[in-house]
Each structure stands twice: as C-alpha cells, then as structure tokens.
C-alpha cells in the first residue's frame, strides 16, 4: 500500500482519513478518534497531508510535520466546490480536500508557528473586547435616550453623558443604577483593552517586519503586528494585486461578452486586516491636504472626482500593495514625490 496524499478532515473528536496513491486512486478510508490520530500517522511513511485551514489545523500541522510528513493547508472555499452535492459528510469532505489539493491552481496556506498564534490570540481578544465595549456604549445611549438625554459620538463622550444622568433628578433611581452598572462594565473593558494593546504594541516594536510596516502612512503598530502574525510568507502572492485581492479590497467582476462590469469590493480574506487598513486609510484621507507625497497628491486628486468612502477603500487597496512590496523586498517605506519648499532648499 503506497500512500502519496492524505486528505484529513478534522473535528473536535472524530477525524476522517482519505488516502490516495500517486495516480489519485483511493487506497484507504478510515475514521479515527482524537486519541488515535498521532499513533496512526507515526506508523505511516512520510507523505503529503492536506487539511482545511480552519479550527485547530495549524496545531495538527505542527504535530504532523514533527512526525516527518509534508503538511499543506488549503482554504475551505477552495474545497467546497469539490464536495458532491447532497453528500455532505466527513468522508466526502476528506475526499474533496484531496481533489482540491491535486488541482494545479490551488494555493496553500503556510502553517503558523506557536509565536504567531500567540500574537493572533491577543488580536482576537482585543477585537472581542472592543466589540463588547461598543455594545455597552450603544446600550447606555439607548437607555438614556428614553429619558431625553443624548451626547456626541465616541466612547470618550460617555463620561459627559453619565454626568447628565447623575444630575437629572427626573430619572428614576433604579434606572440610574442600571446605567451606572453598564458604564462601570465599560470602564473595566477599557482597562482590559489598554492592557492587551500594550502587549500588541510591544510585539510590534520587537518584530523587525512589523517595524518596517509601521513606516507606511496609515499603518500603526496594531495593524503591523496583525499582518506579520497572519501572513507567514508573502511570496505565496504573485503580485501586490494578488495580496490586495486576498484581503478582499478589489472590485467584484461580472463580465461577459467582452464587457467588463465591476461592482463593490469582494470582502474576502482576512476581515480584521481589511478593517484596520480601511480605518488607517480613513485617517489619512482626512489628513490628505498635509500629506506631502505622490500618494497624498493622488488621494487629493481622487477626492475631487469620487466620494470619500470610495477614496478610502481605494487608498486601503494601495496601502495593501505597498505592504506586499515592502515585505517581499525587505525595505522600509520612503515617500516619493515629496515637495521641498524654496526656504528648505536654501537651508
């Protein structure tokens, strides 16, 4: 029995194996319990093991690599088209993984190290805490609005809103206590967010790649840290456009008969990186008049012809391409087209 490739469908307790030979013929189908997985692969000669890049796939990839196997991770959306319609089960998923991996145009995801997954855990916690803080802030605003009180946007304005709540004697005491409880919880979340962000910033300052990314306008330490922890190898993207497309920052296409139709951005890939890039681009758009470079002039010219939200996404796309260029060439960002005033030139 010569096994060339194994499609491994992972789960919490049950793992499905679909093994094929060099010709693609089925050699073995087997269901394994979690406790049996390592012992099973220890007995096998080194072969290619393919899994979907989800759940604990990176953990199992590191384990199987230590056993001498060549592990490849494939995106779930690349596997889905090969699952037979009406036959969605673990065995069919494992077979579809093998089929997808044998396609010449399939791209694989490099396995992440423990250090990278540790940094990504910090980013996941921060994202969850920020979401909870926003939910609490919206709940506070909604409650006090019922009593006729409002405040400007922003988490920082909640303190002003609470002063209004404390001084308004028409609000019942039980309602005031309920709002105060939400505000205290929001305060505790703010402290937790600051502590997590301090750890992320420390990582960004230690990591050489993150320091280079932080030289790009619109990218701060949090965005830089997330990118270097998420993208293991930038060379898997053939060009800067491929990297921007992976982040979902390119328009959808619905073209036929030689007519090109472009729609909104695809929003595929890593949602958190895309969100942070758009936020960074938004801050740079509002400061474009003071952005003394070719990209700044390009942004100002685009603002004269297009809506600000479209310009923001276009700038995020450009920043993503700059990220790919810097990381593949091991360079830092240098602004091009910087204008020097006459006084500075004389000096």
Image (cartoon, rainbow, N blue to C red):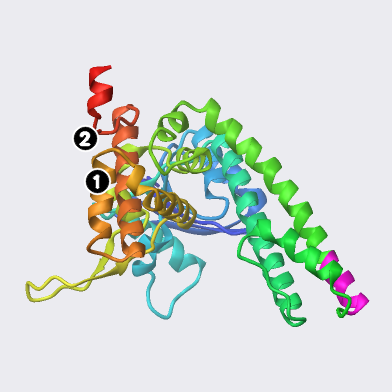
Residue beneath disc 1: 297
Quarter holding the C terminus is top left
Residue beneath disc 2: 337
Q: CA distance from mark 2 to mark 1?
A: 9 Å
Dot 2 or dot 1, earlier in sequence: 1
Q: Residue at x 60, y 65 (%)?
A: 153
Q: Quadrant of residue 248?
A: bottom left
- 82 relative position to 225: left or right: left
Q: Quadrant of residue 231?
A: top left
**Frontmost residue, 248 versus 68:** 248
Question: Which residue is outermost to the right?
Answer: 173
Q: Position of residue 171 (x, y in %)?
A: 86, 78
Where disc 2 sits, the SS reads: loop
**What number is the disc on residue 333?**
none
Q: Position of residue 59 (x, y in %)?
A: 57, 44
Give neighbour class at mark 2: few <14, some 14-19, many 20+ (Cα, 10 Å): few
Q: Position of residue 240 (x, y in %)?
A: 26, 45
Q: Is 211 inside the magenta-drawn segment?
A: no
Write down the region rendered in magenta.
Answer: 172-180
Q: Is 177 inside the magenta-drawn segment?
A: yes
- 42 relative position to 92: left or right: right
Q: Residue at x 31, y 69 (%)?
A: 264
Question: Which residue is outermost to the left?
Answer: 258
From what the image shows, is residue 295 above or below residue 30?
above
The answer to whether marks 2 and 1 mark residues whose Cβ atoms lie closer than 8 Å is: yes
Give neighbour class at mark 1: few <14, some 14-19, many 20+ (Cα, 10 Å): some
Q: Is residue 13 visible?
A: no
**Frontmost residue, 170 versus 312:** 170
Where disc 1 sits, the SS reads: helix
From what the image shows, is residue 296 above or below residue 174?
above
């Amino acid at each position: 029995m010569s096994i060339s490739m194994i499609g491994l469908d992972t789960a919490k307790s049950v793992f499905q194996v679909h093994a094929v030979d060099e010709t693609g013929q089925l050699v073995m189908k087997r269901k394994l319990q979690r406790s049996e997985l390592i012992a099973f692969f220890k007995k096998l000669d080194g072969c290619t093991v393919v899994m979907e890049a989800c759940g604990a796939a990176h953990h199992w990839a590191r384990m199987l690599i230590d056993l001498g196997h060549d592990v490849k991770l494939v995106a779930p959306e690349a596997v889905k088209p090969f699952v037979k319609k009406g036959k969605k089960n673990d065995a069919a998923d494992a077979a579809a993984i093998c089929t997808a991996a044998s396609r010449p145009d399939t791209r694989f995801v490099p396995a992440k190290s423990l250090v990278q997954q540790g940094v990504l855990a910090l980013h996941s916690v921060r994202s969850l805490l920020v979401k909870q803080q926003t939910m609490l802030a919206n709940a506070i605003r909604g409650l006090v609005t019922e009593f006729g009180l409002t405040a400007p946007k922003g988490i920082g304005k909640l303190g002003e809103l609470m002063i209004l709540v404390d001084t308004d004697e028409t609000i019942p005491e039980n309602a005031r206590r309920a709002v105060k409880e939400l505000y205290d919880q929001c305060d505790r979340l703010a402290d937790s967010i600051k502590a997590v962000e301090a750890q992320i910033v420390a990582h960004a300052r230690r990591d050489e790649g993150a320091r280079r990314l932080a030289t790009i306008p619109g990218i701060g330490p949090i965005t830089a840290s997330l990118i270097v922890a998420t993208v293991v190898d930038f060379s898997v993207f053939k060009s800067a456009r491929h990297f921007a497309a992976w982040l979902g920052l390119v328009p959808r296409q619905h073209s036929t008969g030689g007519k090109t139709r472009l729609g909104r951005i695809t929003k595929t890939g890593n949602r958190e990186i895309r969100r942070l890039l758009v936020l960074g681009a938004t801050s740079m758009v509002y400061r474009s008049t003071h952005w003394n470079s070719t990209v700044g002039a390009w942004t100002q010219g685009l603002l004269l012809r297009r809506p600000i939200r479209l310009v923001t996404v276009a700038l995020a796309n450009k920043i993503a391409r700059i990220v790919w260029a810097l990381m593949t060439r091991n360079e830092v960002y240098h602004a091009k087209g910087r204008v020097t005033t006459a006084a500075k030139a004389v000096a």
